[in-house]
Every structure is written in C-alpha cells, then in structure tokens.
Image (cartoon, rainbow, N blue to C red):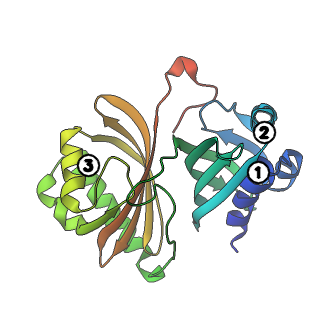
Amino acid sequence: MDKKLENARNLYLRAIRDAEVDEVLENYMGETYRQHSTGVPDGKEGFAQFFTDFFKRNPKRDIQIVRDFADGDYVFMQVLQNLNDGTVQWVTADIFKADKNDRIIEHWDVIEAYKKNLPHDQILGKFEIKDLDLTEKNKATVRLFLTEVMQNHNFSKFENYISSDLISHVPEISDGSAAYKNYLLDHKVTYDFVFKVLGKGNWVVAYSKIIDQNQAQAHFDIFKLKNNKIVEHFTVTEPIPKNEDLTNSGKF
C-alpha cells in the first residue's frame, strides 16, 4: 500500500476509531498539521484537544473506510462513521496532504448526516479502481465538465459529460442525466471555485465551493467514469461556517 495512504488510514482508524491519538501524532503526522475541519482547532495540539472531548461524547465508534486512493501528495477518503451503536451516523469526504516523508501535514473534510433507505445508498457501493492509464484523461474530463457546465452554465454541453443512465447516490437526485440536470437548474447551483481535483483510474473527486439556493457550501463530487462519461455520482455537502465561527483557517 502507498505509504501516505497507509498513514491517512491510520489517522482515521488508530486515532478516531481506537483513540490512540499519541500514536498518530508521533508516527503518522508530520512536524506540523494544518486543519480545515469545522470545529477542530489548527495544529497537532488542536487535533488532540478536539478528539479528547469527541471520545467522551462518542464512546462507541465504528469507522468504515468505503473508498480511498492516493494521487500525488494527496489522499482522498470517503468514510462512514457509526457512533454509539448507530444513534449518530455521518458520511465524510476527506483530503489529506502528505510531506516528502509521506506523513500527513494538512487535512480538509466535509461532513454530512447519513441518510438511509435510498434507492442507491448515499455512500456504500462497489469500489473498484480500473483504467489506471486513463487517470489524467478522466480528471481532464471532470475539470471541463465543472468549468463549462457548473461554472459557465453552458448546459448545452451537459450530455457530453453525463451518461444518460447515470446512477445517483445523491439523496435529492434520481437516476439519469435528466434528473441531475433538472436539479442543478431548479436550484440554481453555481460552482464558485473548484479547489482540488484528484483521481485514480475511473474515479475522480472534486472539492469545490458551491452556491446552492443562495447558500455557500463546501462540496465534494465523487464521480465514476466509463468511456469518458460520468456514470455514477456521490456527493458530500456541508454549509460553510461564518468567519467568526471558524476555529482554524477555514474549509479551503
């Protein structure tokens, strides 16, 4: 396994699941740790401080890493958190940045409540990485889709990127390209900026600031591609806190 991917996994499993925070600070994080997670103070000390209280509030923690991959200095991870025997359930999408020694030095995430009983589960599903030789092509396709359609609102090109039989794991959006397109138009969704695009083979992830019904949100799109089109779609979305409520340098 890629060492940076292993370190990111250990951060989640050993620290957040198993409460072995000191082990993580000493072995898997770099000398510094910059944080972009809502409510978590910056730095390694802030990480330890936040999770000391988190463990008291959530003595039972089941952490399931559903899909993850490394791309350059970055690791993407999508996680289902079951806390206190499932009384609280969260879906998270995370990006970790590693230093030259593959230790984690920066973290971004978006957290959303897990919704059950959907036609296609909000996070669970088959995850198989294929078409490694198409990684850069697939990333370029997603960038063009986000630029031409999501930012410039050229919806005449929508079907160039989205398969007509799109599988949607988004609670508010039914299957098919038409349902996705109609949702975007009805909600007047605008992508203010795309912060990061990561990919591995047939999977591409974009982390963006979007405006949905006049509300600013931190937003992950997780796309699966086939034959140069998006065929499956997951999202994780979180309202962006006000500046006065931030405990670190913000979502981006």
Real-space Cα separation, disc 3 to disc 2, in angstroms: 36 Å
Q: Left of 159 or right of it: where is 112?
A: right
Q: Horizontally, is 121 left or right of 12 in the view?
A: left
Determine whether 44 is above or below 92 in the image: above
Instruction: State the image coordinates of residue 238 (x, y, percent, origin top left).
Output: 47, 37
| Pair 2/1: label in front | 1
Nearest to N terminus: mark 2 or mark 1: 1
Residue 241 seen from this side: yes
Say which element carries label 1.
helix
Return the mark for residue 224: none
Residue 44 tag number: 2
As measured in the structure, the alpha-carbon distance from the residue carrying label 2 to the one carrying label 1 is: 17 Å
Specify whether residue 72 is in view. Answer: no
Q: Could you tell me which residue is drawn at 58 percent across and 67 percent down?
A: 69
The label number, if any, that marks residue 17 in the structure image: 1
Q: Position of residue 149 (x, y in %)?
A: 22, 52
Mark 3 or mark 2: which comes first in sequence? 2
Q: Report which quarter residue 41 is drawn in.
A: top right
Residue 40 in percent (x, y) is at 67, 33
Rounded to the nearest angstrom, the CA distance separating label 1 from label 3 is: 36 Å
Identify the residue at image location x=49%, y=22%. 242
Q: Which kind of residue does numbered mark 1 sit on?
A: Arg
Determine which residue is flagged by label 3: 150
Q: Secondary structure at mark 3?
A: helix
Residue beneath the point at 31% across and 36% down: 212
